[in-house]
Amino acid sequence: MIPADFDDLLGQLTLEEKVRLLTGQDFWSTHPLPGIGLRSMVLSDGPSGVRGAVWDERDPSLNLPSATALSSSWDLGIAHRYGVVSALEARRKNVDVVLGPTINLHRSPLGGRHFEAFSEDPVLTAELAAAYVAGVQELGVGATPKHYVANDFETERFTADVVVSERTLREVYLLAFEKAVTESKAWLVMSAYNSINGATASENDLLETPLNTDWGFDGVVVSDWTAVRSVESAKHSQDLAMPGPVGAWGDALVEAVRSGEVKEDAIDRKVLRLLALAARVGALEGFEKPADVPQVDGVAFTRTAAAEGSVLLSNKSELPWTADALQRVAVIGHNARDARTQGGGSATVIPSSVVSPLAGLQQALPNAEITYSIGAVVQEGVAELPLATMTNPVNGQPGARVRFLEADGMELFAENRFSSALVYLGGNAPITDTAVFEFHTTYTPAESGDILLGFASVGRGRIFADGNLLLEETAVPVGTDLGAALLSPPSVTAPLAVTAGQPIDVRVELDLPDREGGLGNALSITVGVEPDRSDPQSLIDEAVAAARAADVALVVVGTNSKVESEGYDRTTLALPGRQDDLVRAVVAVNPRTVVVVNAGSPVLLPWRDDVAALLVTYFGGQEYGNALADVLLGVVEPGGRLPTTWPREQDDVPVIDVTPQDGVVRYDEGVHIGYRAWLRAGTEPAFGFGHGLGYTTWELSDLRANDPSSVALIVRNTGERDGKHVVQVYAERPESTVDRPVRWLAGFAVVRLEAGQAREITVQLHDRTFEHWDNGWTTEPGAFTLRAGSAVSDLPLSTELRIR
């Protein structure tokens, strides 16, 4: 509840001051009002790490595993600790609000931000989101479930209208958000870009009902960046428009209140909620953040979370490996050396270091001979230059000199950087259409040969090597999405012959184009080298030779931020490049081939039945390589179970469309998304929802329903190792007057038992398990079947529960 004395603070404010508070003062912070003891609040992207107010390698952040890895743990304790670690990072960086978790659903595996969201199931999503939010807010940092609501695709995300039934909204898409608000009391919710049934999210009645009326939300609805586009949204339960200082409200909203178009009471309610948020995060005089914070090793947790979220899809008695038995190991794959630890877009953070699979195995197997072969190129566009190859020409230290210049060459701004991948979102850099950006370094290549030197950005650029102009060209963004243009820009390169150890003076100039809209004060550019794709078969041949000579082969396949990113959806589930050819060729010469999938979301695995073991590790965070080595060598179990169905073929996916038709995306499948849609279609996926193996075996028995809120059963570890199991309970109602899924997740529980140990456990069922929406929550009386097991298609136990 909002304290009554906030009314006194409100009474001290003029209309202009009230309205000013409702739009950010810049890209990441709110306006202060020192007269009432209100300081500015800092908001930060943060689903998988907290970047802070700057996107800068000089201020690194903890890079946690992707949300798909978190959700694969099915562990509410891990989700809670994930939130706590995020809050500790936020406090370290003086951030008040974390813009996460992202809890839109995996409606289609093509969704561009699939990696950033939890699951295809609303119950699994809701439980994990509530635990995450609780962990963040325990430490006096605001959490922001997003994007409210039905924002499950990227194509035309700013303008598309989602047409969806009220029942589907309530039972699926809103259900994913509900518990984070009703139980964990989220302090913020982010409204989405898209429209829902004809009204933009920031101008939609869903912001009031169910959010405020049914769920009791008393927090702040913050817009997605630039999502507030008119004064109309101020008439709805939209509280804070970001970014600032220019937006759709401001003077126009002041005038609208004075003219009577918008009631001042609506403005007052928004301001009171902002003051309440300020009190909760310690930004209002007289209210302080909690002084006692837990001491948590964030790096160690990142390693644990990555292992807990790794899913062993198949294992022909190959894993775990015994370290002493491995003399020669062939490590293969672009992602084995250049691991992808996070997806692209606004969720990106810059870690202080990353442990690749290659490095992780080298450290874990010091006595083994480990070879490395790239096998197949995955990277698209330029990759940043390694810091070890760059020397700042001004101070002689590692790095580069960056300047912003007037057209006549006068210096406006200069700084020394330690990366050639730079992003400016807000801040002090003079990013205007009259400025020229300059990147300058001395590059010393490690190998001789022909390279493709260039940059990835938007605008007209020039590439110089040793003072010679190699290329002048304009990089034009693909599509109209502002986020994609900023964070996944096109590359421009020119060929250059280099000699190992011979320094080259590299300079790139970029004329900054006119930047209109809310992302005007923003720029991203990467200076680097594009991979050589001239002889792909030779790369496969080299990998095959290494695999043939090794005891075991580890092939790491995957995607990257060009494939999975905010701003656009995927068009194919196939692995990029010739990775499928690579796996087939390696398996043909070494039957002990283990394949690791370093991708944030489902990909096609046409060779899945041929490999000795198959492990999905998602985007594993900065400790990825160490966590992978732990799993491969049996130091820990692969603790994950799939939160989303993985298909055999793309054409098999029953709900896949992410492309608006005439500006509209129709959720005509209703409540049948994810595994529900697969069950209704009767099509067999490659790996079903909930699937995952460990290093021991399990037996379930004696299922009984206690009441509509829980079931009990006996779980026994029948193997020779300690292990983790995820017990899953589903409900069915075959004879029903309601259009129901074949079955739906009702509850789940993580069980950890020693070898040979048995335990009776209770699994709590979701409050809505037996309800459906029909102009209100209602229950169809009669018998429901409850099934328990290890996956949606592996449910050996059943019992019946009669609902009155």
Image (spheres, grey):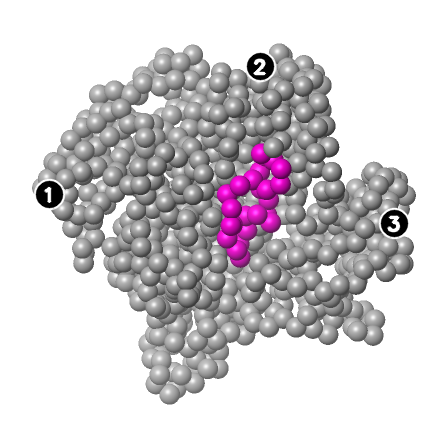
Type of amino acid at the residue the image marks with label 3: Ile
Report crowding for label 3: few under 14, some 14 to 19, many 20 or more residues within 10 A (C-alpha): some
Type of amino acid at the residue the image marks with label 2: Thr
Type of amino acid at the residue the image marks with label 1: Pro
Report crowding for label 1: few under 14, some 14 to 19, many 20 or more residues within 10 A (C-alpha): few
Q: Which residues are magenta?
A: 557-580
Which residue: 38% across, 53% down?
Answer: 186
The verdict on residue 223 being magenta is no
Q: Which residue is mark 3?
A: 504
Of 575 and 613, the residue lying toward us: 575
| 274 to the left or right of 342 | left
Q: Could you tell me which secondary element the residue under label 2 belongs to?
A: loop
Q: Which residue is mark 1?
A: 781
Which residue: 22% across, 21% down?
Answer: 702
Residue 575 location, x and y as percent?
56, 40
Question: Which mark, by number, is residue 104?
Answer: none
Question: Which mark, by number, is residue 322?
Answer: 2
Of 684 and 413, the residue lying toward us: 684
Residue 776 location, x and y as percent?
18, 56
Residue 509 location, x and y as percent?
78, 63
- Is residue 178 in view? no
Residue at far bottom of view = 259
Cα–Cα gap, marks 3 and 1:
77 Å
